[in-house]
Amino acid sequence: MEDINNRKFVGRLIYSVLTEHRSVREAILLFPDSQDKNIECAYHALVHFEADEDLRYKDYEYREEQNDYLEFIAQTLSEGKSLPRNIIADYEEYYKGIAHPWINGTKGFIKEFLRFINI
């Protein structure tokens, strides 16, 4: 039941980004700590969305495609459903979990940074 509630919450977070009521950074900071692959996938899709800001600005078709993709993720999660396996697989190979604010100062930052770049 917790996974379903978290999925619905994450779906609302993504909608809030798409409607420009919240920045990607704000949404990411609100992501629940979860082992649910659907939530991890949504997290990384949102990070990817933010990383492509320059490309999105230059290429209208790419922006529309990416918006539709995120909207599909948001709609599916808002209904408490699982994302299609192929979408989860697109992110699963490259990322491990959700990044969280580091603990223990500089040492925690370095540990989180190395995990983020997959070392």
Image (spheres, rainbow, N blue to C red):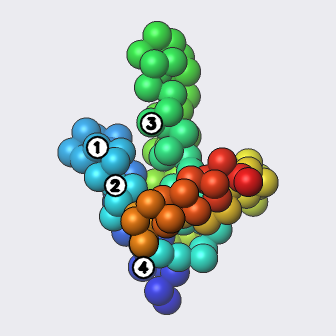
Mark 1, secondary structure of its residue: loop
Farthest-out residue, left: 21
Q: Residue at x 21, y 45 (%)?
A: 21
Amino acid tagged 3: Glu
Residue 116 at x, y percent in the picture: 61, 53
Residue behind mark 3: 50
Residue 5's disc number:
4
Comes first in the chain, label 4 or label 2: 4
Which-is-in-front pick, marks 3 and 4?
3
Mark 4, secondary structure of its residue: helix
Mark 1 and mark 3: span between their CA atoms? Answer: 9 Å
Left or right: residue 35 versus residue 108 is right
Residue 23's disc number:
1
Q: Nearer the viewer, residue 90 or 47?
A: 47
Q: Which of 110 and 15 is in front in this view?
A: 110
Left or right: residue 27 versus residue 106 is left
Residue behind mark 2: 27
**Quadrant in which residue 57 is drawn:** top left
